[in-house]
Amino acid sequence: MEQQRQLYPIGIQTFSEIRRKNYLYIDKTEYVYRMTHFDSKYVFLSRPRRFGKSLLTSTLHSYFEGCKELFEGLAIDKLEAEWTRYPVLHFDMSMAKHVDKERLEQMLSVQLYRYEEVYGKVSEEVTLNDRFSGLIRRVCQQTSRQVVVLIDEYDAPLLDVVHEEKNLPVLRDVMRNFYSPLKACDPYLRFVFLTGITKFSQLSIFSELNNIKNISMDGPYAAVCGISEEEMLTQMDNDVDILAMRMEVSREEVLAKLKDNYDGYHFTWPSPDIYNPFSLLNAFADGKMNSYWFGSGTPTYLIEMLNKYHVIPQQIGDRKALAESFDAPTERITNITPLLYQSGYITIKGYSPITNLYLLDIPNKEVRLGLMKSLLPGYLHQHTMDGLTTVALLYEAIYEERLDDGLRLLQAFLSTIPYCDNTDYEGHYQSLFYTIFSLLGMYVDVEVRTPRGRVDVVMRSLSALYVMELKLDKTADDAMGQIDLKNYPERFALCGLPVVKVGINFDSERRTLGEWKIEMA
């Protein structure tokens, strides 16, 4: 008999609805208490999309409105004694995506008007910042309480134009003017909380509010959004057993699959393991694992920025950087790392206290596969769907230890792709190989160091480790000869798997694999 399943708040970001309708709620209220009793009353939190920022903002809203009954049994219930009610101005900027200047101003005006209907408006207040400033003052005067301002996804109007030199400054000026009263109204404010994905330094919240507390990389807030492994194993322990039963695997197997697909996020170091909450809850709700987070939104701005900075697929992960290099203001970036990190496509995987360098890499299988699928059209154009079918058949061939059949399949497919520019160099085929083999869901790396040189491609399946050397317009013997001359397999002798040498020559005239040789090391 199947156990009763939990109600999962898929797409529900309102704290009061989750509590009143008995949806699963991962208790983050200890963080709410800590945050609201800071020395600084201005707090900023950056996290990737669909990581729980809106729910956290809604939780703060209910807390400041003094809704004590919603918090019964939660951590804050034992911490808070006063439950003072404050007036809350809550702005959701996610509705202002894909807009021009006029539409953005109209949407901001509508959000102000909701509160002006309650607290009134002075005719002399015409501009958005004058109306916002006047509203804060009137709310404070009429309620005799300082005002709480919550701004969720403050950067949403700017993300889609972050790569546009013309539109970004125009929309940024609108947002800067709108946020500017937050400093001037300091005496009237009890608490200001802003969430976002990226940092735009030229907005007033960062350039003028010099006392704003950015908790994005603070250790005590490492798990303020997302679901930590400890939270999953305690607050969702029964859910894990139900998922294992529905997938007809053991508890240990389902935990390993969840970790492989959705875990791996760290927003500081050291940090608990953080799971993507959107993907995790969807997997529990559906009883299966799928690409939920990546499939929930096409990262068009990310692809545009990857093209702008000429980033090839194998350069996305495995980066080392100082914190100020990846937690940097978006409009000042000189490479793609800050946007990749702040958007959740790479995350912290390690830290060296000697060099102060962080190791950044793709967090998990879901993100890696999603990224590669998004990048594949750059190589295959309108043949992308056929390419994904070929990848599936290639996976089957490698899984069954038929690499020769798989390469033959890839050779036939690539020969059908029409000619495109900039394919007559070895690096193009290395990038294409990396993208395709990454989609197999197996470990793949390029330019792997050995004592005598660098291996073009290393791929590990369940049954073997493949050491691949790629050549362009030469021969497979040339490629295999380099593997033997530099004894690349020696570097992987202790990997625990049979090592297979693969020498491949690409034919630039036919624009596909020419010949190859496969030998056991």
Image (tube, grey):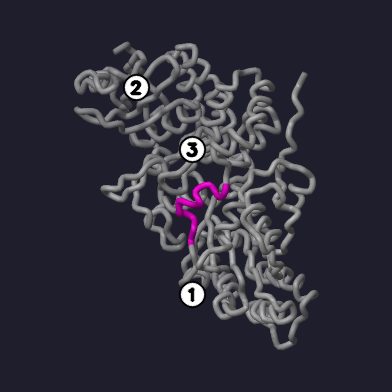
x, y percent for residue 153:
60, 59
Identify the residue under disc 2.
504
Instruction: Classify 10 Å Cα crowding around label 1: few (below 14), some (14-19), many (20 and above).
Output: some
Q: Nearer the viewer, residue 96 or 507?
A: 96
For this rendering, which residue is in front, 231 or 406? 231
Q: Is residue 512 left or right of residue 300?
A: left
Q: Any mark on residue 208, and which?
A: 1
Label 1 secondary element:
loop
Nearer the observer: mark 2 or 1; the answer is 1
Amino acid type, residue under disc 1 in the picture:
Glu
Amino acid type shown at disc 2: Ile
Among the two numbered marks 2 and 1 on one chain, the one whose residue lies closer to the N terminus: 1
From which residue to which does the magenta span run? Answer: 214-225
Q: Secondary structure at mark 3?
A: loop
**In the rendered structure, does residue 61 fall within the stretch colored magenta?**
no
The Cα atoms of the two marked residues, 2 and 1, are separated by 57 Å
Q: Which residue is painted at 58% across and 72% down in the image?
A: 179
Q: Which residue is mark 3?
A: 264
Q: Which mark is residue 435?
A: none
- Which circle's residue, 1 or 3, is located before the other in the chain? 1
Disc 3 versus disc 2: nearer the observer: 3
